[in-house]
Amino acid sequence: MRLAERMSRLGTETAFEVLAKAKALEAQGREIIHLEIGEPDFNTPGNIIERAKKALDEGYTHYGPSAGLPPARESIARYISETRNIPVSPDEVVITPGAKPIMFYAILALVDEGDEVIYPNPGFPIYESMINFVGGVAKPIPLREEKKFSFDVDEFESLFTPKTKLVIINTPSNPTGGVTPKEDLEKIAEIIKKNDCMILSDEVYDRMIYEGEHHSVASFPGMKERTIILNGFSKTYAMTGWRLGYGVMPAELAVQITRLQTNATSCTASFMQIAGIEALEGPQDESEKMIEEFRKRRDIIVDGLNSIDGISCHKPKASFYVFPNIKKLGMSSSELEQFLLEKAGVAALSGTSFGSYGEGYVRFSYANSIDNIKKAIEKIKSALGK
């Protein structure tokens, strides 16, 4: 089969590849502790599930507008207005099947062949994949451990050229759990305005912060009209399988993103959008309990990893990931990923799954029980000791 050349530039998420390997070992009778997948191990809150069922009974089983149902767009606009302290109207909201389409559509809509895109590295692998896919030039800004996995603003500014078309930031961050400080976001905002480009702000983990509060680059003066906020329901409400996300952006760009949605998926499932309204506007107690449980798990996995010779782990301020330094073990990141799976029975991800600057690190997701996290630490200690 003769595929289009662009397919050779398309990357993937290796988390699903490691999951497949882990499942194969489990099929052979091996016990595997899954710390590779970024998915809450909690059920979707009951009120959201019940609202979805009711929506089906109410007839929300048909096509809806490509940009999203008006009540759902209104609910998201209110949420972003209140939490980012900026005025947002429904016509600036596009609802998509999961949050990923927003990054796909935004890059398709804004980046021509040869245009440069600055993006975080290590970072969510689909950023670089999509930049390369459309023929853009991917320019990584390193996230450095000594900066608590934020980046150096001066280094960031040095990457800009007349060809810079788009910047991508992710705070709180996957895979590191790092949070970009408010003072750095303010500097980033000034650099974006000076260079007259757009910014895609991935804020999927905005509610999963354990220290301080979330700040959006869109909240700074003059930035709303330059910012695409990417967000969704998967993490905060344990709704990964529902595939429900959204983007908030200038209205004129929302029209173009909606055209892409019409061509790609037609629309997002109507009954799930009704459930999304309930998620935002209904009781938050189950979500808050989940986030508090993640805080406990974070402390346990960080302490456990720091007790292992050759591993040091910075305590992240957000998300449900840790990104420990494994350079003293004398193995590459990919070698340790394979070693942990095969010898320790612990599934984790090589830091290089998130870009070249992830070498010397691995990512563990602590979206698993405290008992399993403790067991994983002991398995890793034992395997390395041998």
Image (cartoon, rainbow, N blue to C red):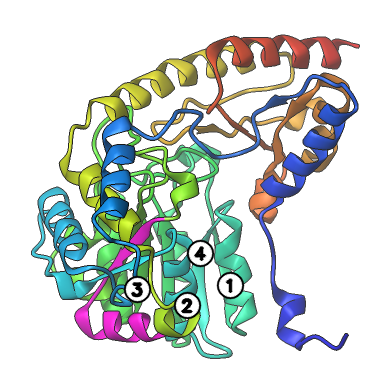
Say if residue 26 shows up in the picture: yes
**Residue 213 horizontal side relative to residue 74, left or right:** right
Q: Quadrant of the C terminus?
A: top right
Note whether 90 is above or below 232 in the view shown.
below
- Name which residue type carries label 1: Met
What residue lies at 51% left-to-right and 29% top-to-bottom? 41
Q: CA distance from mark 1 to mark 4?
A: 11 Å
Residue 251 x, y percent position in the rendering: 20, 80
Residue at the spot of label 2? 107
Q: Nearer the viewer, residue 18 or 216?
A: 18
Q: Which residue is mark 3?
A: 63
Asked if the residue under mark 1 is in contact with the one under mark 2, i.e. CB atoms within 8 Å, the reply is: yes
Q: CA distance from mark 2 to mark 4?
A: 12 Å
Q: Toward which corner of the image does residue 42 lie, by quadrant?
A: top left
Residue 50 placement (x, y as % from top left)? 29, 38
Q: Nearer the viewer, mark 2 or mark 4?
A: 2
Of 15 and 225, nearer the camera is: 15
Q: Which mark is residue 119?
A: 4
- For badge 4, the amino acid type reads Tyr
